[in-house]
Amino acid sequence: MGRLLNRNDMNLELDDWQKHAFLMFHSKIADKERKFPCIPAIQGYVLDQLRYGFVADPRTEDAIKETAYFLKEYGQCSKDIGEYSALILFYKTPYDLQILTTVKLFEQIFWNLLNKVSTLDTKEWPKSVSPDPSHFSWEFCFEGERYFIYCATPAHEHRYSRYFPYFMLAITPRWVLNHFFTTNQASGKITEVIRERLVKYDKMQPHPDLKWYGQEDNHEWKQYFLRDDNTGMSSCPFHYRPGKGRNEQY
C-alpha cells in the first residue's frame, strides 16, 4: 500500500503517470483564468489541506483494497489537517481506459468500485444517514464518516468540470462542507457564486441533478457521477451491506 501524501511530497520519487496526474491536477485547480467552480477545493489546495493517494487501475481488486485503505487512513487524520480537507485519489488509467472507454462505462466502473469498497467497511453507518439512496439523508459513509464523492474521467468532453485525464475521486467529509456553507452563508450568495462559476467553466447549464444536501427532493448519489449530458441513472446501483467487512483485512 502507498501512503497519504501532501503537496510537498510530490517532490518524492514517483512513477511517471503519478507525476503527470498531479501536474494535471495542479493545472486544473490552480488555473487563475478558468477558475475551478468548487471554492472549498481551491482553498484546500492553496492551504495544502488536501491529501493524495495513487491507486491501481479502478477495474482491479487492488484498487478496491487500496481505496478502502486510503479512506480509513484519511478518516483517522482528516480533522487534524484543517477545515478545507479532502482526499484526492488518482487511479492508474491505461490506454484503453483513457481513450476507448465511454462515460457510461466509467459510470459502471465507479459504482462497482464504490459497492466493493463498502464491503470492506468495518463500522455501521451513522444513525442519521438512511441506508436507502432514495432518501434525502443518504450519502456514502465509511468507517463511521460521511462523505461527498466527486468522480472525474477522461471520457467527459462537454462537462469540463468532470473531466480529468485519469480516473479520479475527490472525497470530502460532510463536516467540511457543513462548516464551509455555514460560515459563508452570511453573504447569502455563496451557492449562487458557485453555480455561476460552474456555468462559465462548463459553458453549459449545471446538470439538473445538482442540488444541495438536505433538500427533500435531493438525491445525493446522483451527483457523485454526472454524465456528459443531462441524463442520469433511473435508480442507484449502490447497495449497503451492514457489517459486511467487519473481519476482513485490506
Image: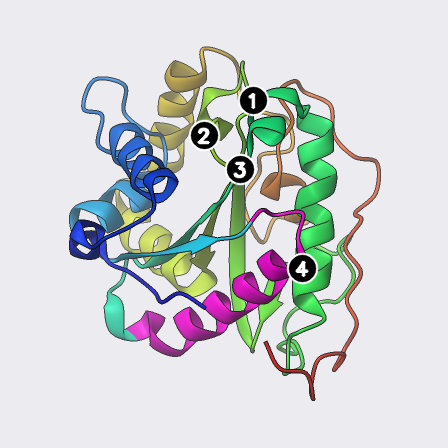
Q: Position of residue 156 (x, y in %)?
A: 56, 22
N-term-proximal mark, 3 vs 2 = 3
Quarter of the picture containing the C terminus is: bottom right
**N-term mark: 3 or 1:** 3
Determine which of the numbered discs, if any, sits on residue 164 in the image. 2
Which residue is nearer to you in this view: 141 or 135?
141
In the shown orientation, is residue 203 left or right of residue 140? left
Closer to the camera: disc 4 or disc 1? Answer: 4
Q: Are marks 1 and 2 in contact (CB under 8 Å)?
A: yes
Q: Secondary structure at mark 4?
A: helix
Closer to the camera in the image, 25 or 223: 25
Task: Tell me, for residue 156, which label it has, or none.
Answer: 1
**Image: magenta residue range:** 57-79
Residue 1: percent from left, percent from top: 45, 68
Mark 4 Cα-neighbour bin, 10 Å: few <14, some 14–19, many ≥20? few
Q: Is residue 63 magenta?
A: yes
**Residue type marked 4:** Glu
